């Protein structure tokens, strides 16, 4: 399995090839996208980079679109939409947010979560933890029909109770199962959030 640093370098190399002069372009892009689309993508990536927005997710969106057989204009539209969402996420989360957090926040916004809600969650957590997983779970349960405010309140409640990533993963699984078994999405999220975080065992407290 390729580790994250190596994967990032590979993606950067592909992105660099995609944005190079026509004679040195990655053939996957040079043969699939028209010149105006390539120019538009270059401009979007340059703009994102100038704003401090991670560009790797943008290039991943390009390759995803090509893999699905989308034409140039449609890929440009998808990249432009993602750029705007990531820019809003970046403004809401501030400079302390990681690239992964910004990407996850953009996914949550795409699902319908307002940037202000993401900013509140980041403010609540401060520098104590990464919100990549909480944002990802928030996007998932909203996409399954949980109302935005209910979903945000559930994640906020879990975080306030000291939930770890494993707890939030379990919450996501339980909400998904409840919904699949016929529970109203809002009720599923509220019930599972109220269950909270398992109490710490005495032996675990002694280890701290």
Image (cartoon, rainbow, N blue to C red):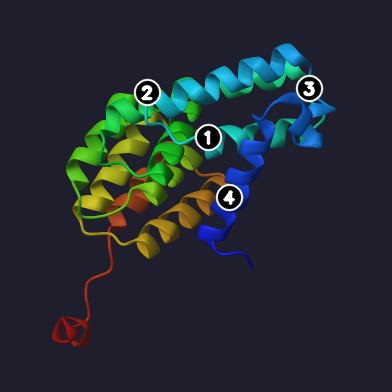
Label 2: element kind: helix
What residue is shown with label 2?
Answer: 88
Frontmost of labels 2 and 3 is 3
| Spatial separation of the CA atoms under disc 4 and disc 2 | 35 Å
Q: Is any part of residue 114 visible from this angle? A: no
Disc 4 from disc 1: Cα separation: 17 Å
Q: Quadrant of residue 109?
A: top left
State how far apart marks 3 and 1 are (Cα).
31 Å
Q: Earlier in the sequence, mark 4 or mark 2?
A: 2
Give the residue number, with chain letter if any, for mark 4.
Answer: 181
Q: 110 or 203, which is in the foreground?
A: 110
Tag 1's secondary structure?
Answer: helix
Q: Earlier in the sequence, mark 3 or mark 1?
A: 3
On the image, numbered disc 1 is attached to which residue?
A: 143
- What is the C-alpha distance between the residues marked 2 and 3? 27 Å
Residue that appears at 43% across and 61% down: 170
Measured as percent of width and height from the top left, residue 202 is found at 17, 84
Q: Name the disc covering residue 33, or none.
A: 3
């Amino acid at each position: 399995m390729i580790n994250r640093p190596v994967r990032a370098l590979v993606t950067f190399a592909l992105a660099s090839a995609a944005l190079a002069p026509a004679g040195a372009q990655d053939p996957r892009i040079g043969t699939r996208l028209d010149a105006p689309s390539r120019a538009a993508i270059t401009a979007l990536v340059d703009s994102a980079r100038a704003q401090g927005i991670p560009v790797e997710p943008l290039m991943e969106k390009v390759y995803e679109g090509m893999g699905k057989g989308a034409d140039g204009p449609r890929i440009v539209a998808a990249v432009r939409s993602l750029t705007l969402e990531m820019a809003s996420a970046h403004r809401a989360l501030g400079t302390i947010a990681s690239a992964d957090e910004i990407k996850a926040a953009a996914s949550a916004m795409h699902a319908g979560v307002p940037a202000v809600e993401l900013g509140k969650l980041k403010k609540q957590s401060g520098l104590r933890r990464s919100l990549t997983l909480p944002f990802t779970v928030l996007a998932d349960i909203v996409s399954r029909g949980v109302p935005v405010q209910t979903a945000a309140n559930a994640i906020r409640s879990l975080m306030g109770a000291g939930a770890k990533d494993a707890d939030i993963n379990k919450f996501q699984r339980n909400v998904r199962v409840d919904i699949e078994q016929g529970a109203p999405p809002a009720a599923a999220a509220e019930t599972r959030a109220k269950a909270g975080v398992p109490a710490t065992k005495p032996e675990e407290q002694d280890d701290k």
